[in-house]
Amino acid sequence: MLSSSTVSQHTTAGVREITLGQAIREALAEEMRRDPRVFIMGEDVAEAGTPFKVLSGLVEEFGTSRVIDTPISEAGIAGLGVGGAMTGMRPIVDIMFGDFIGLAMDQIVNQAAKVHYMSGGKLKVPLVVRTTMGATRRTAAQHSQSLQAWVSHVPGLKVVLPSTPYDAKGLLKTAIRDDNPVIFFEGKMMYQLKGLVPDTDYTIPFGVADIKRPGVDITIVATSSMVQIALAAAELLEKLEISAEIVDPRTTFPLDKDTLIASAKKTSRAIVIDEGYERYGVTAELASVIAEGAFYYLDAPVKRMGAMDVPVPFSPVLEDLTVPTAASVVEVAKTLCGRV
Amino acid sequence: MSQTESPKATATNKDEEQARWLAMYEQMLTIRHFEEHVNQLYMTARMPGLAHLYSGEEAIAVGVCAALRRDDYITSTHRGHGHCLAKGARVDRMFAELLGKEAGYCRGKGGSMHIADQDTGNLGANAIVGGSAGIATGAAMSIKMRGSDQVAVCFFGDGALGQGVLYEVMNMAALWKFPIIYVCENNEYNEYTHYRETTAGDLSARSAAFGVPCETVDGQDIRAVYDTAQRLVARARQGEGPAFMLCNTYRYYGHHVGDIQRAYYRSKEEEERWKTQRDPIQLLADWLVEQGMTDHTLFERIEQKVQAEVEAGEQFALNAPFPDPGEVEEDVYA
């Protein structure tokens, strides 16, 4: 899916349909060719190309000095990333599963996020931490969480949640060129998602939401994996003559509050969806932004939809209950529109 | 000494040696006076927050940093004033940072536990115990990737031996031969608890397990510290990889300035013994006299110079303006 804001810019030659995983790899390769300070380190990133095969081929082009297999030491490699970034390199640290950022949390939260401020603006940490999120892969409670709320909470970090191959490439390039620590969450169930992506160099600015589908009756703000769910729900809602506008913030920080509020003012109803746990989650912040900014325009309370507040279960029958689906979004949308 | 060396050259070497040791003496004395003033500022309620004084441990920071170049990196700890000064920080801007003033090294945003000074290669003191091990090792990785001949030094205390991240990064430093020296300042106490109650086994065996050579040093003897540091730094600079320096030392004050009643964890006699018999400044002074490198007048002159510098620095900081409130949201992002 090519996002609406970009169709006009890139309808010429060089636009192909590739997967989200290929878009990530292409962004990394182009940035590594552009800037010799950029390198990748993580567990099984070189010959293995990660368990998701997202990095396949990079070590062949850039060698093991720039695509570095590390020990299984998330705290250590995140720490090396911080120190390397402070002293002239632009490291990309691969944390295989988002669940493992718990191991690296001190380095991300107390070191990377604080260095620039604590030093009075003298030191910088141009670090990218790439990691994954998302359930329904049948990998249970320690390989399925979507923990973007944890890092979105911390001043000093920027947090990116691409939902399409086009966005993934443009946002990752922006992340690599940013002088701040950026946490980049890839939906692991979306690596095979296909979309139109230019083979040329382009970036997407942080803090600019994208209207993935225009509508007039209800706003559905969705992040990452939930954008696809929201788009599927919008198709179903159209048959019920409910026109849903799908807004993708793309970055939880910086957050494009204006676009969220403007959409909610236009439609008077809003659902916010993120695959993280619902309680104290990204959806709480998004709902609060809309409730404060569009209060007098709303015909119904803003409705949050996140993962159920349980550890992600293994059994497929149980796991599928824990994340929002197109059907569950349709039900909530109908309720908000007074159609039940 | 080469056989062809002239008597004049020998005299010059002797002069250089004297100048070097006197500079280290002055540096240690500066740190000692600085910390005494910090303690007074705290006791008289003119300094906000906490301070963890370095008094008693001066020979380590000064001896190690004397073996470094200005563009070499260090990372420091919550007990970091000595490291910062030894790496070249100015007394007045140090005081200003401790008092939360705009003229401080971090414009008042870091304070005692977070002083960083890019110009002297100081990548920052760190208030998480063991927290800078990753940064220092990452800096060493960056040195190697950039093809530079700099060296990184990671200062930490015995308490950091309980932190897993230290071992994670030491493993990688050994694997990839990073130019880094891990300097453990064992002052015997993890805050208020003797390290033997918290630390199993042989301290020097830890780095040895990674194939990182460990040298155990009397941390009160600056000549031993300097000689060892010089050797290990030269080794790292030549690409021979990381090393571990285990420096045995003692902290004269409590864990922090407010830790005054210490009898429940250590005796006054123990403290007195270190101060009277193992003081690093006195030990160097005794040796300098013994070598005929100095005399009473010279000591007096250094003392006066240091006192004047520290007093002027403190006054500068006390009179300096606080940051503008508008700066609170500055520098969150680059």
Image (cartoon, rainbow, N blue to C red):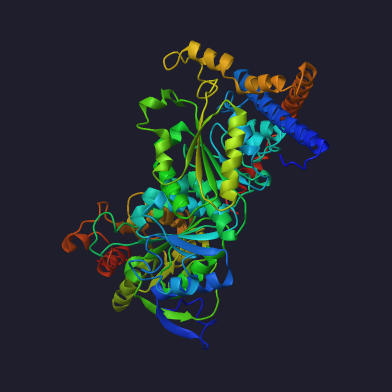
x, y percent for residue A127: 52, 57
x, y percent for residue B126: 53, 39
x, y percent for residue B51: 57, 27
Q: Indicate whether B115 appears above or below A243.
A: above
Q: Using the rendered image of the protein, determine whether residue A23 is visible from the camera's viewpoint.
A: yes
Q: Indicate whether A280 appears above or below B309.
A: below
User: In which image quadrant can residue A145 be found?
Assistant: bottom left
x, y percent for residue B83: 61, 35
Q: Indicate whether A102 appears above or below A195.
A: above
Outermost residue, bottom side: A13
Nearest the viewer among A70 and A97 is A70
Q: Indicate whether B126 appears above or below A330.
A: above
Position of B57 with respect to A107 (left or right) is right
Position of B247 with respect to A303 (left or right) is right
Can you say which quadrant of the picture contains the N terminus of chain B? top right
Nearest the viewer among B137 and A99 is B137
Can you say which quadrant of the picture contains the C terminus of chain B? bottom right
Q: Using the rendered image of the protein, determine whether residue A150 is visible from the camera's viewpoint.
A: no
Outermost residue, top side: B269
Outermost residue, right side: B8
Nearest the viewer among B96 and A44 is A44
Q: Residue at x 27, y 61 (%)?
A: A323
User: In which image quadrant can residue B303 be found?
Assistant: top right
User: In which image quadrant can residue B96 be found?
Assistant: top right
- Count of marks, rendered view: 0
Nearest the viewer among B126 and B57 is B57
Q: Residue at x 49, y 14 (%)?
A: B270
